[in-house]
C-alpha cells in the first residue's frame, strides 16, 4: 500500500512459521525510497485463505476479521504519523527509524509543534463541552501559526525537538515577532507567554526535563485605558435618543459599565442567568466566556431598570437574551455616535465599559479589590490590580488640581484680633 512517493506500507503473511492449525503470522513491511526496507510482526495469526494480500486485510465480517482489520488500520495510521513527525525534523528518514519510533525504541523527545497540537486538541475538547471559549482556541491556533512561521523563517526547520530549544529561542522569537512581523511589544509577549505555557505542559507530561525559557521575563506595558467618569456616565444615562439603535447601544453600554460584563458575556446573557440569590437580591450568575471563571454580579438599580426596559423587546424574546446587542463591529460603531452626541471626547469601545465598572463604579467608591476581582471573573487578583493603579492615578491627578486652589487663609477672627 503506497502512502506517498517515498513511503510505502504493506501488510503480508509469513509462511515460514505456520502453527499447527496452518495459520500464518501477519507482518508489516515499511519501505522508503532509497533505503533498505524493514518491518515487524503484528502478533496475529490467520488462515492464508482469509487474507487478501492486495487489500492487506482479512476477508469477511466475523468478529476476528473486524478486530484484526481495525488493528491494521491503526498500525498504518500510526506509522504514517511517526513518519511525518520524523520528516518534520530530519530530511533523512529510514524504515528502521519509523519502526523504532513506532515501537518506542530510541525515540527522540517530542517536538514543539507536536506539543502545541496536543494542547490545542485538549483545549478543543473543552470548547466542545462548553467549558472554554472558541475565541481563545483561535488564539492558540494563531500561536501555532506564529511559532511555525518563526521556525521556518529563522530556525530554518519545519519543527524543533524540545531538547534543542534554548533560552535564546525566546529572545529570537520576540525579535522576529516585533521586527519582522511588526507586532507591538505587548502582542509579541503574549505569544512568548503562550510558548512558555506549552513548554511548561511538556515538563508536566515528562516530555522535557526543564523549561528552557522559564526565566524569560514577559514584560507588559499597561496601555492607556479610556474610562468614563461619574459625570460622563450620568450624562450618558440622562441622554435620550430618538434613533432606536443608538438608544439600545447606549443602554447596553451602561449595563456593561454597571455590571462589568464584557461584550461577549453581555451578548449571551439569558433570563435564566438572573436569579434571586442567597441575600434575596437579583444577581446575574454565570461563568465568564473567556476564562470560564465564575462571574456573579449583584444588579444595581439602574442595571435592573435597563433589563426591565427590554424584557418585552421582540429581539430579546425571540433569542432568549436580556439585551438587543448588535455585532461587535456595529456596536462599537454606534457607540462612537453615542459618545459624540453626549459630548464625550473618548474612544469608547465595548471593553471600556468593563474598565469603567472596575474603576469609576466600584474601586473609586470603596469596593474592596478582592470583591471587584470576584465580580470581574479574574483568575488572579493581580489582573485586577491594574485598575487599582488607574484609580490611584486619577486620585493623583485630582489632588494636583486641589493643590493649585487649596490653601488655609487666615481666619477673619484672627485678622480682627490682630488689628485690635
Image (tube, rainbow, N blue to C red):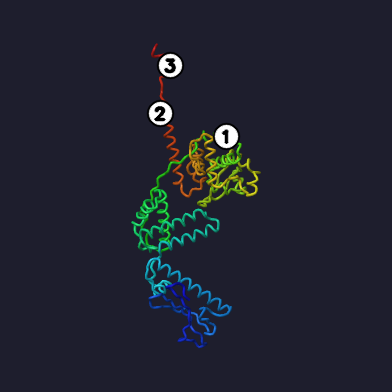
Question: Who's the residue at 53% across and 57% down the image?
Answer: 127
Secondary structure under the numbered disc 2 in the rendered image:
helix
Q: How far separated are the C-alphas under marks 1 and 3? A: 48 Å
Q: Identify the mark nearer the N-term, 1 or 3.
A: 1
Kindly identify which residue carries mark 3.
Answer: 413
- 325 vs 101, left or right, is right
Label 1 Cα neighbours within 10 Å, binned few <14 / some 14-19 / many ≥20: few
Residue 239's disc is 1
Question: Who's the residue at 50% across and 52% down the image?
Answer: 291
Q: Nearer the viewer, residue 136 or 341?
A: 341
Kindly identify which residue carries mark 2.
Answer: 403
Q: Identify the mark nearer the N-term, 1 or 2.
A: 1
Nearer to us of marks 2 and 3 is 2
Q: Nearer the viewer, residue 15 or 273?
A: 15
Residue 89: percent from left, percent from top:
38, 66
Label 3 Cα neighbours within 10 Å, binned few <14 / some 14-19 / many ≥20: few
Furthest residue to the top? 420
Q: How far separated are the C-alphas under marks 1 and 2? A: 33 Å
Secondary structure under the numbered disc 3 in the rendered image:
helix
Residue 356: percent from left, percent from top:
50, 40
Q: How far separated are the C-alphas under marks 2 and 3? A: 25 Å
Residue 307: percent from left, percent from top:
61, 42
Q: Is residue 292 above or below residue 109?
A: above
Amino acid at each position: 500500500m503506497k502512502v506517498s512517493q517515498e513511503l510505502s506500507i504493506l501488510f503480508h503473511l509469513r509462511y515460514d512459521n505456520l502453527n499447527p492449525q496452518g495459520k500464518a503470522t501477519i507482518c508489516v513491511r515499511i519501505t522508503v525510497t532509497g533505503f533498505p526496507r524493514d518491518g515487524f510482526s503484528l502478533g496475529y495469526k490467520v488462515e492464508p485463505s482469509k487474507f487478501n494480500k492486495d487489500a492487506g486485510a482479512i476477508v469477511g465480517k466475523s468478529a476476528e476479521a473486524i478486530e484484526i482489520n481495525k488493528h491494521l488500520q491503526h498500525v498504518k495510521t500510526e506509522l504514517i504519523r511517526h513518519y511525518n513527525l520524523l520528516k518534520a525534523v530530519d530530511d533523512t528518514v529510514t524504515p528502521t527509524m519509523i519502526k523504532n519510533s513506532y515501537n518506542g525504541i530510541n525515540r527522540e523527545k517530542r517536538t514543539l509543534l507536536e506539543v502545541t497540537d496536543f494542547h490545542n486538541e485538549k483545549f478543543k475538547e473543552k470548547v466542545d463541552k462548553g467549558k472554554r471559549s472558541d475565541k481563545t482556541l483561535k488564539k492558540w491556533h494563531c500561536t501555532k501559526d506564529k511559532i511555525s512561521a518563526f521556525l521556518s523563517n529563522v530556525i530554518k526547520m519545519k519543527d524543533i525537538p524540545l531538547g534543542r530549544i534554548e533560552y535564546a529561542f525566546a529572545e529570537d522569537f520576540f525579535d522576529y515577532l516585533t521586527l519582522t512581523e511588526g507586532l507591538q511589544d505587548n502582542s509579541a509577549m503574549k505569544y512568548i507567554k503562550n510558548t512558555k505555557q506549552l513548554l511548561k505542559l511538556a515538563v508536566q507530561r515528562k516530555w522535557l526535563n526543564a523549561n528552557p525559557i522559564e526565566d524569560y521575563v514577559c514584560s507588559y506595558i499597561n496601555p492607556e485605558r479610556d474610562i468614563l467618569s461619574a459625570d460622563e456616565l450620568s450624562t450618558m444615562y440622562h441622554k435620550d435618543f430618538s434613533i432606536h439603535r443608538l438608544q439600545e447601544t447606549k443602554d447596553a453600554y451602561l449595563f456593561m459599565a454597571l455590571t462589568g460584563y464584557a461584550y461577549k458575556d453581555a451578548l449571551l446573557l439569558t433570563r435564566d442567568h438572573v436569579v434571586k440569590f442567597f441575600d434575596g437580591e437579583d444577581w446575574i450568575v454565570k461563568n465568564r466566556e473567556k476564562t470560564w471563571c465564575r462571574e456573579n454580579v449583584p444588579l444595581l438599580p439602574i442595571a435592573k431598570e435597563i433589563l426591565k426596559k427590554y424584557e418585552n423587546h421582540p429581539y430579546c424574546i425571540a433569542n432568549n437574551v436580556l439585551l438587543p446587542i448588535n455585532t461587535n463591529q456595529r456596536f462599537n460603531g454606534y457607540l462612537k455616535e453615542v459618545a459624540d452626541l453626549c459630548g464625550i471626547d473618548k474612544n469608547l469601545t465595548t471593553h471600556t465599559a468593563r474598565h469603567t465598572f472596575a474603576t469609576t463604579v466600584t474601586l473609586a467608591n470603596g469596593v474592596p479589590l478582592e470583591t471587584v476581582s470576584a465580580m470581574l471573573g479574574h483568575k488572579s487578583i493581580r489582573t485586577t490590580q491594574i485598575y487599582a493603579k488607574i484609580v490611584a492615578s486619577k486620585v493623583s491627578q485630582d489632588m494636583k488640581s486641589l493643590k493649585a486652589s487649596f490653601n488655609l487663609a487666615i481666619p477673619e477672627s484672627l485678622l480682627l484680633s490682630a488689628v485690635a
